[in-house]
Amino acid sequence: MKLGAFSVSLTVKDIHKSKAFYEKLGFQTFGGVIDDSWVIMKNENCTIGLFQGMFEKNILTFNPGWNQNAENLDSFTDIRDLQKQLKEDGVQLLTEADDSSTGVAHFTLEDPDGNVILVDQHVNRP
């Protein structure tokens, strides 16, 4: 199963303090809008998202259709196909993508320890 680019989305208490901390670890701003309480940071192939007040727990994030630099891939497994395969394998989803849609969509699930996983596609079907 090819899930796409991976990042960790962290819920933070103070976006400015967290950004400054991760900059000390060598991360640089890659995207986002800090005034809207979110920023994406990279250190080589490691990507983290810092989000203040947007969700309760940290989230593992996968982006079908993107490489680690958020560049569109020519070929990838569409999110609806990933969702179908997971459901056929008996994986319970918290939220689902609309099977009749195309393009941008997402679904969420939890691992056995309650860690939330977001599969979030930002591009159209290949």
Image: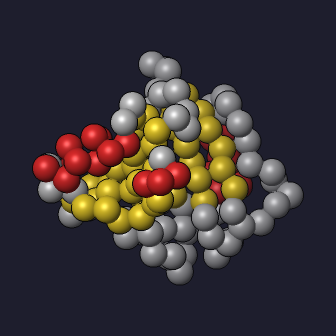
Residue 85 coordinates in the image, percent (x, y): 65, 46
Can residue 108 be seen from the camera position used here?
yes
What residue is at 60 percent from the left and 59 percent from the top?
Answer: 121
Q: In this view, does 25 lie above or below 126?
A: above
The picture quadrant where one finds residue 47 is bottom left
The picture quadrant where one finds residue 14 is top left
What residue is at 27 percent from the left and 55 percent from the top?
Answer: 46
Could you say which is closer to the camera, residue 30 or residue 85? 30
Q: Is 122 left, or right, of 4 in this rendering?
A: right
What residue is at 71 percent from the left and 67 percent from the top?
Answer: 103
Residue 27 coordinates in the image, percent (x, y): 22, 56
What residue is at 52 percent from the left and 35 percent from the top?
Answer: 53
- Tell me the quarter of the image containing the C terminus: bottom right
Can residue 111 be seen from the camera position used here?
no
* Residue with the most extreme bottom position: 74
Residue 24 coordinates in the image, percent (x, y): 13, 50
Could you say which is closer to the camera, residue 8 or residue 84? 8
Residue 98 coordinates in the image, percent (x, y): 80, 51
Q: Is 77 left, or right, of 42 in this rendering?
A: right
* Residue with the most extreme top position: 113
Could you say which is closer to the camera, residue 74 or residue 66? 66
Q: Is residue 108 above or below residue 5?
A: above
Q: In this view, does 103 lie above or below 12?
A: below
Q: Is 113 left, or right, of 26 in this rendering?
A: right
What colour scheme was applied to this rendering of the protein?
secondary structure
